[in-house]
Each structure stands twice: as structure tokens, then as C-alpha cells.
Amino acid sequence: MLQDQKVSFSGVQPSGNLTIGNYLGAIRNFSTFSEQYKCFYCVVDSHAITVRQVPADLRRRTYETLALYMACGLDPEKNTLYVQSQVSAHAELAWMLNCFTMFGELSRMTQFKDKSAKHADNINAGLFTYPVLMAADILLYQTDVVPVGIDQKQHVELCRDIATRFNALYPDTFTIPEPIMASSGKKIMSLADPTKKMSKSDENTNAVVYILDDKDTIIRKFKRAVTDSDTVVRYAEGKDGINNLMTIYSCYTGKEFDEIEREFDGRGYGDFKLAVGEACADALAPVQARFRELMADKAYLEEMMKKGAAEASYYARKTLSKVQRKLGFVQLK
């Protein structure tokens, strides 16, 4: 389909304010793929409704997520930026792939177990089949690589299994994608409980640093970050809080852990927390400024949505037509 260039696909949910975990683990790294791959970056709003959403908030966050993509360095002239629900092929292929996905496979998904526990009053079928829609997202574009955080790697592995199973019955239908994880910042942890992943849905706002937090808020949150009773800045087992802060600082400064340990030798946790907060705030300042410019021009964002949806649909329909033909569906010309 895109024979002269390999394909990369990524998606981010507009289900809450995006965190530095989303930024460091995924979004910041996206732009590095633009020169090497044909890139599809999707605002996965269909995934978001597995959890109840306030419609006005979902619409606003869809604009915001698209704006953040661009503010973080994704050029809409070099990348296909679009909204999932505006390309109907995603939902159509998801149904077909449901018929090639085993119940047992879905029941073993870690995120289904976690979200079922968190949303016990709304364990819906969409929550269960979420990974199949994710597989459709990826396979529609004959994707070669999927940049993911470690928490999504299991879903990409399932996608590979589904594609392999389908290809065994109907050869040469799908490209088998490979997950790619960032070498650092794979998983940014909560500032309040560093044994848990930083989550945009965390009820404790002090546990989470959002991409759009102002500098004072960022520094205050890092100052309150849970550490341990030690005073030495070093990466070691049992020092989850400091390990997390060192990971964040490393992501923003490019410094290795041994460099960070030497920099803060004898200086204590207070100095270190302040330095992490300042490094984070300084890195996010230009992102926030560009975001505000984009959000002030809704017409431009909608123009980019239409452009991206048309481009994505062109490629997605090619794969969907191939699948329909191989399954025996009657296609009218």
C-alpha cells in the first residue's frame, strides 16, 4: 500500500487531561518517526467511550488532543493527524476482527481487569473488546511499527496474534506490526504512589503532572512527591519515588542516572525535587504556548481534522475493501 515507506501508527485517547506520562512515554517521541515512516496519529475518541464521558468535555478534549499533537511537534503536512470516529473503517474492521478473536484472549487482558475493577458499575462489552478496535486501528494502515508504552504492549501482541490468524486463513492480508518502546520514560509513575502508573484519571491531582499545568503548579506537585526516608539521590531497589523522579529528570535533561547521582551528591531531596520540577516546566513552556495559539483557531483545527480524515480514509478503505473481498462480502461498484 505504501511500498516505498514503512508505516507507523499511534493513538491517544481524549478522555482526560494528558499527563507528562503520555508526553514522555509517547507523544514527545512521535515526531522522531516522521522522517523514517509514513505516520498516522489518531485521536482515539471511540476508545474513550468505554468509560462514560460528558459529551461537551469529550468534544473539547478531542480538539485539545489534536492541538497537543501539533504543539508537541507533529507537522500535519508530514503526518496524517485525524480523529478516529471520523474514519468509519475503524469500526467496520473492528467487527470483522471480533470474529477472529478468542474470548479467552480478551479475558486475559490486564487493562480489562484493571478497568473492570475501577468501573465496576459499567463493565460493558466495549471495555472487553477494546483491544480488537485497537487492532483494527493498527491493521487498517498496514502498520509496520507501533510506538507504545509498556502498558499497551500486550494489546499490540494480541493485534499480532489476530493478524497472524487472519493471514493463515486469508494469506497476505495484513502486515504484522512490531511494538516499539522508548528507551527511557517507558512508564512514568504516580507522584503520590510511585508503585502505580501516572494516570490522567487519578482522583488525586497531586499525583499527576499534566502537560498544561502552569510552572508553579508543576513545581508544587514535584515538591510534594512521595520519596523515602533516605536523603541520597541514587537509583536503587526500594527507592520507587526517587527512581521515578530520576527517570523523569533523565527524560527531560538527557542525563544518565550516574550523572544525576553525581550532580546531586550531598544536596538532598529538596534540591532534587525543585530541579525536576523546573526541568519539566521549562520543557513544557513552548508546548503550552503553541497549544494556546492553536486552540484560539478552531477553524484551523477543523480544517486539519477534515484533511487528516480524508487522507486516513483513503488508505483505510483500501485495507477494508481487501478484507471484505477475502471474507466473501458482496461489493457493489
Image (tube, grey):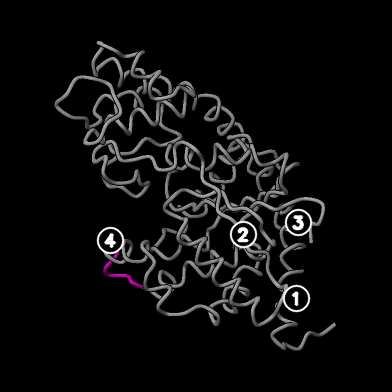
Indicate the amino acid at tag 2: Pro
Name the residue at 73% across, 39% down: 35
- Whether label 3 touches label 2, CB < 8 Å: no
Q: Which residue is mark 4?
A: 118
Find residue 211 and report its image quarter. top left
Looking at marks 3 and 1 on the same chain, the residue that comes earlier in the sequence is marked by: 3
Q: Residue furthest right?
A: 333
* Mark 2, other Cα within 10 Å: few <14 / some 14–19 / many ≥20: many
Q: Which residue is mark 2?
A: 177
Q: CA distance from mark 4 to mark 3?
A: 37 Å
Q: Is residue 56 above or below residue 235?
A: below
Q: CA distance from mark 3 to mark 2?
A: 21 Å
- Position of the C terminus, as image quadrant, is bottom right
Name the residue at 54% across, 64% down: 134
Name the residue at 37% across, 22% down: 276
* Mark 1, other Cα within 10 Å: few <14 / some 14–19 / many ≥20: few
Q: CA distance from mark 3 to mark 1?
A: 18 Å
- Whether label 3 touches label 1, CB < 8 Å: no
Q: CA distance from mark 2 to mark 1?
A: 18 Å
Tell me the element at label 4: helix
Magenta segment:
119-123
Looking at marks 4 and 3 on the same chain, the residue that comes earlier in the sequence is marked by: 4
Looking at marks 4 and 2 on the same chain, the residue that comes earlier in the sequence is marked by: 4
